[in-house]
Image (cartoon, coloured by chain):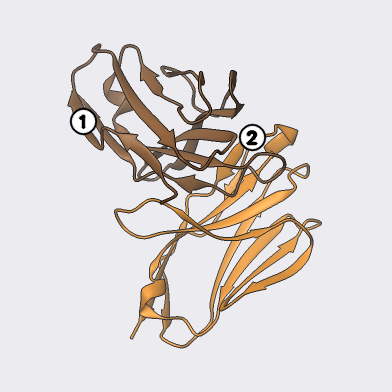
Amino acid sequence: EAQVTQNPRYLITVTGKKLTVTCSQNMNHEYMSWYRQDPGLGLRQIYYSMNVEVTDKGDVPEGYKVSRKEKRNFPLILESPSPNQTSLYFCASSWASGNTGELFFGEGSRLTVL
Amino acid sequence: QKEVEQNSGPLSVPEGAIASLNCTYSDRVSQSFFWYRQYSGKSPELIMSIYSNGDKEDGRFTAQLNKASQYVSLLIRDSQPSDSATYLCAVANYGGSQGNLIFGKGTKLSVKP
């Protein structure tokens, strides 16, 4: 089954404790991206990757890191989480080459930072 | 300023009616436009993409694009209660930045039986 898998789905953590949200896709997609969704603010792009070893900032990259060492994986790293990073996070992937907006989304990871 | 604007709604239509959802964007360089549907508590799913001016039809859905007016719309014919969801407009390659995808805040649609 074609899918984007995120883990963990739910996480409660404390300020400053480093965490990683993993994302893996099995569709051989070149493009991957991370979004956060907040009430009243909608979906906002954090980082994206056009291909392996190629990443770029989205609109809200502060406080986040990513890496793309393998085509299928695109982890989101919060080095020192803060309460304003409490949000619902989505990983998504697509074929590149002009249709990067035709995204397959993961189920989401709900993060609470206390 | 990157902006993709949608009416937040809720937009309420009776079952069987046409639902019309609208979206405007501020960047003339953008070339690719998308409509996503998001049910409450679920992840967004792609329902339509449109790249050229004019209409694109897929079943009960029609996407319309007018680049000169920087306007994209989604029509849902014969609306069903199962269409009740939040509809997100998305614009890709914003400002010419390949890979940059901007979403509107969404319009909540309610279809009444």
Residue that badge 1 annotates: A11
Image quadrant where residue A35 sits: top left
Image quadrant where residue A79 sits: top left
Q: Residue at x 51, y 23 (%)?
A: A70
Q: Quadrant of the C terminus of chain B?
A: bottom left
Q: Chain of mark 2?
A: B
The amino acid beneath tag 1 is Leu
The amino acid beneath tag 2 is Gly
Q: Quadrant of the N terminus of chain B?
A: top right
Residue B99 shows which numbered tag? 2
> Local crowd at mark 2 within 10 Å, few (<14), some, or many (≥20)?
many
Q: Colour of chain B?
A: orange
Residue A103 is situated, as x and y percent measured from the top left of the image, at 54, 47
Q: Residue at x 78, y 59 (%)?
A: B52
The image shows residue A25, relative to residue B86, as above or below, that is above
Q: Residue at x 41, y 33 (%)?
A: A24
Question: Judging from the image, what secondary structure is the residue with disc 2 in?
Answer: loop
Image quadrant where residue B61 sits: bottom right
Q: Chain of mark 1?
A: A
Alpha-carbon distance for marks 2 and 1?
28 Å
